Structure formats: C-alpha cells, structure tokens
Image (cartoon, rainbow, N blue to C red):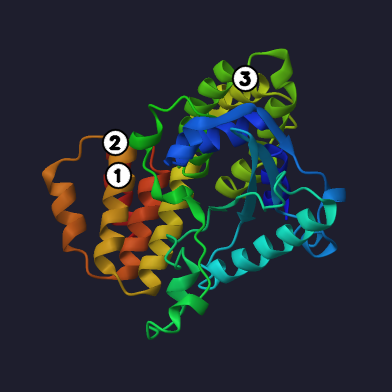
Amino acid sequence: MEHDASYKLLFAHTRMVEDLLRGFVHESWVRDVDYTTLERVSESQISDNLLDRRDDLIWRLRWGPQWIYLYLLLEFQSTVDPAMALRVLVYQGLLYQALLRAGQLSPTGKFPPVVPIVLYNGRGRWTAPRAVEDLFDPLPRSLTPYRPRLRYILLDEGRYTARQLAPLRNLVAALCRLENSRTPTDVQRVLTLLIDCLQAPEDDSLRRAFTVWLRRVVLPVRLPGMVIPEVQDLMEMHSMLAERVVEWTQEWKEQGLQQGLQQGLQQGQVQEARAMVLEALATHFVDLPPDIVTLVEAVEDRERLHALLRLAITSPTLDAWRAGLHQKV
C-alpha cells in the first residue's frame, strides 16, 4: 500500500506523465500532443466503479483539436496478471460511460481515444498478452468481427538495463533506475541526477514525493532492519547517503550474499554457494591468490561453505581469514 500511494503521488505531477510519454511511449502521436494542456481528470468526472480503482490515475491532453485520455494503471504485484488486457478493457468501458454521462464527447458526438498504460514493477518480467484479442482461441473468419480489440502500453521497469536508462535525462528513467538499484551508491548516483533536474521552485512538490518514496519504500526494502533518518529533501537524502554509503553498501552486500547463499543451499546448489564465498572474498580482499580459489572450489559440503562465507564477511584481512579457517571450519 505504501508503494502504491507513493507512485500515485509521483504520477500526480505533469512532469512525470510527460517524461513517461516522451521517454517510453514510442508512437508517432506522442510527438504531436500539446504537453502544456496536460491536466488530471477529477474524481467527480469519473464513475463510482472507477473510483474503486484508487491506485489509478486519469489524465488528458490535447492532440490537435481533440482530447486524448491517458489511463495510468499502477500495478504493483509480484506475479503477472494473465487477464490484464481484459481488465483494461473493462476500465476503458467504464471511463467511456463516465465521459458519456458528463457530456465530454467531441463536437460531433464521438468518443475521444483512451490510451491505457500499465506500469509494472514486479520481480519477474511481464509475460501476459498485451492485446485482448490474444486472450481468445483462434476463431473462424465469420466470428472475428465479434472479438473485442484493445491493446495497452506496458512499462515493465525491470526490463530496462542501467546502460539503457543512464543516458536519459528523464524522471521516469530515474525512477526505473532507483527501482533496479542494488547498492546505496546506485541510489546516490541517481539522486545526483534528480537534484539537478528538479531545481526549480515549482518542482518542490515532486522533490518531496521522490524523497518520501525513497525513505519509506526503496531504502527499507534494500536495508531491512536499518534505521532510515527522517530526511525531508533530496539534498538531505544525498548527504545522508554520502555519510553512510560505505557502511550501508557493505551491509547491503553481506545481506545479499547471505540471502543468496541460503536460497542456494535450500536448492542444493553447491556451485552457487561456492560462487557466493568467492564473491565475498573478492569484495573484501580484491585480488585472491590461486590457492584460495582452489580451496573454495574443492569444498563439497554445504555447511562448510556456509562457515566459509561467514568467515569471509567477518575477517578484517585475508591473513585473518586464513588463520580462522583452520580454527572455525
């Protein structure tokens, strides 16, 4: 719920919606819209059924002489919804009913286009059909006119790599980089970009929205059990990370190594456990002598590998690791 609310707060700002369209919707109509006309559709203009979709946002903007409506579905689920295209079809129909009741049709009495956009930040990649017609079995030609047609735009944040996102001076690209961050150093790097992009006084609200999301959602997930200071601004967040980045990066790595090892041991993946031990040693001591690598590669016992990992994390020097090896393992 905290994540949903934070995203709704972020995408309640016109700059986020504009950057979403400019950076991630690669369709020709995006070049021809008037971004100065972006405006939220108020809750009084939509149906009670749509109000139940409290995590979604509806925007509109001018495309030539007519309005285009953007329906942003903010999905924060760990599993892919195979029927998302059907859900989008239902929501779009409800929005058209609301527009009809409100008399918000074109001068000729026609409906405006509604562009559904699904934002997804689940762990696995999105695999569900993006077109509602793909939910149907093959039909004879005489029945295809009765099959509904609709396609939604998908932003699967985890699909983008840092190499793809880093060159973009785009707030939604920064959001994706923060979602995909692995260390406090990664977060700090993106914070530098956000501070540079959000300097104007009119960006105060958006700066606060990013700060709240980072403090309440991003950092607690990556640093469970750590006390996150109540910083109020991106500059304070940047300074706080700069002070603690070495300490937190180390703890972040150690937590990841421990979690990865536990998963590997549960699955009986001794090779993965060996890799975790070698990664921990390389993180602490950089260059590993060949005999150390040979020793770790020769270990077959999972409990011994677990002990080797703990020793690698806690030893201040490689010599201390060697000395403790014979005493503790």
Count neighbours of disc 1 (C-alpha within 10 A) and say few if under 14, some if 14 to 19, many if 20 or more. Answer: many
Which residue matches tag 1? 281
- The type of residue carrying mark 1 is Leu
Quarter where residue 320 is shown: top left
Residue 55 locus on image (x, y percent): 72, 54
Q: Which mark is residue 198?
A: 3
Count neighbours of disc 2 (C-alpha within 10 A) and say few if under 14, some if 14 to 19, many if 20 or more. Answer: some
Placement of 6 over or under 116, stated as above or below? above
Q: Secondary structure at mark 2?
A: helix
Residue found at x 69% / y 42%: 59
In space, the residues marked 2 and 3 are separated at their CA atoms by 39 Å
Q: Which mark is residue 269?
A: none
In space, the residues marked 2 and 1 are separated at their CA atoms by 6 Å
Q: Nearer the viewer, residue 269 or 322?
A: 269
Residue 94 locus on image (x, y percent): 73, 63
Q: Which mark is residue 285?
A: 2
Placement of 96 over or under 283, stated as above or below? below
Q: Secondary structure at mark 3?
A: loop
